[in-house]
Amino acid sequence: MSKNNRVTLDYIGYIESPFKEKFAIPRQPGLVKAAQGKVILTGDSNNADIVKALEQFSHIWLLFIFHGTQAQGWKPLVRPPRLGGNKKMGVLATRSTFRPNPIGMSVVELTSVEVSNQQVILHISGIDLLDQTPIVDIKPYIPYSDALPNADAGFAQTQPDINVSVTFSHSAQLSLTKYEQEYTGLSQLIEQVLAQDPRPAYKRDKVDDKVYGMTLYDLNIEWQMQDLTSLQVTQITKPCANTSTGNNQ
Ligand code: SAM
């Protein structure tokens, strides 16, 4: 630490993720097991020695920069989504992205470690990270020290009790069948992401007829609520594709 209370960090890599925008990213890791991604190590950290023995660990901590919100600065008080977005809490009592230093931490499953063509890649799942998120450190998850089942966690003691059932329209189902060949596990990913009801927290107990959309990989996925606990995926399209299965079925 220098005299002016500043520290300089070098990114050690970045994330490749199906989540291309903030909307609909799971609010914590592990909530969407089908969310798979990669850590691509870069620069001096792209060195096979740096990950020697890491494959012994089923889970790792990722320390990263909230690069997508960094420019917006931070606030002392924030409104956690799990409180419906209408109660303010101290930012340090939350996992908000709008922190004094935009540092995030997520425990993710390490499914494999790949070193090929002089490139180190960590395959991970259960992620809550935006595509291209910069990584500043990786540590093994150590259950005897990191898991504290009896810890008090105030307003965040238990996993949010949200489980919306997801169905697909005929048109969306046809598109899904087509795009699953390109994106293995796509249907589980869509179902698990939407089961969390990614709409803004204040809408959680409301049915609205708005058509919502999210981007996963390079696909646009649209859905509508049907009632409080179910929704239907109405359309899955690939904007750049010459033909759109979603529109012409
Ligand atoms: N598990 C981490 C933590 O506790 O530090 C992140 C928790 S934060 C509540 C999760 C949200 O951060 C996601 O739902 C997504 O909206 C947002 N997010 C993920 N990656 C981001 C990035 N690189 N920049 C900005 N926001 C990001």
Image (spheres, rainbow, N blue to C red):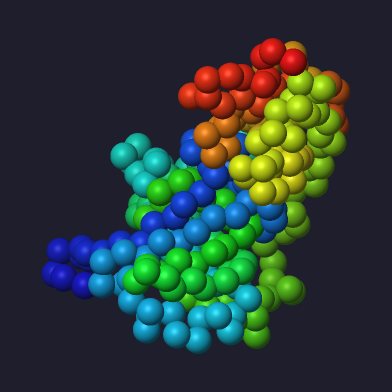
User: Measuring 51% from the left and 49% from the top, which residue is drawn there?
Assistant: 17
Q: Is residue 102 left or right of residue 33?
A: left
Q: Is residue 79 left or right of residue 117?
A: right
Q: Name the one closer to the observer, 62 or 71.
A: 62
User: Measuring 53% from the left and 20% from the top, which residue is drawn there?
Assistant: 242
How far from the left and from the top, in percent, is residue 78?
Answer: 51, 41
Look at the picture and state if 5 lies above or below 247.
below
How far from the left and from the top, in percent, is residue 238?
Answer: 56, 26
* Residue 13 seen by the camera: yes
> Quadrant of the rendered structure where residue 194 is?
top right
User: Measuring 40% from the left and 41% from the top, which residue is drawn there?
Assistant: 68
Q: How many marks?
A: 0
**Which image quarter holds the C terminus?**
top right
Determine the residue located farthest toward the left in the rendered image.
Answer: 3
How far from the left and from the top, in percent, is residue 132?
Answer: 40, 49
Q: Is residue 230 left or right of residue 16?
A: right
Q: Is residue 1 left or right of residue 102?
A: left
Q: Name the one closer to the observer, 104 or 129.
A: 129
> Quadrant of the rendered structure where residue 40 is?
bottom left
* Residue 154 seen by the camera: no
How far from the left and from the top, in percent, is residue 141?
Answer: 57, 76
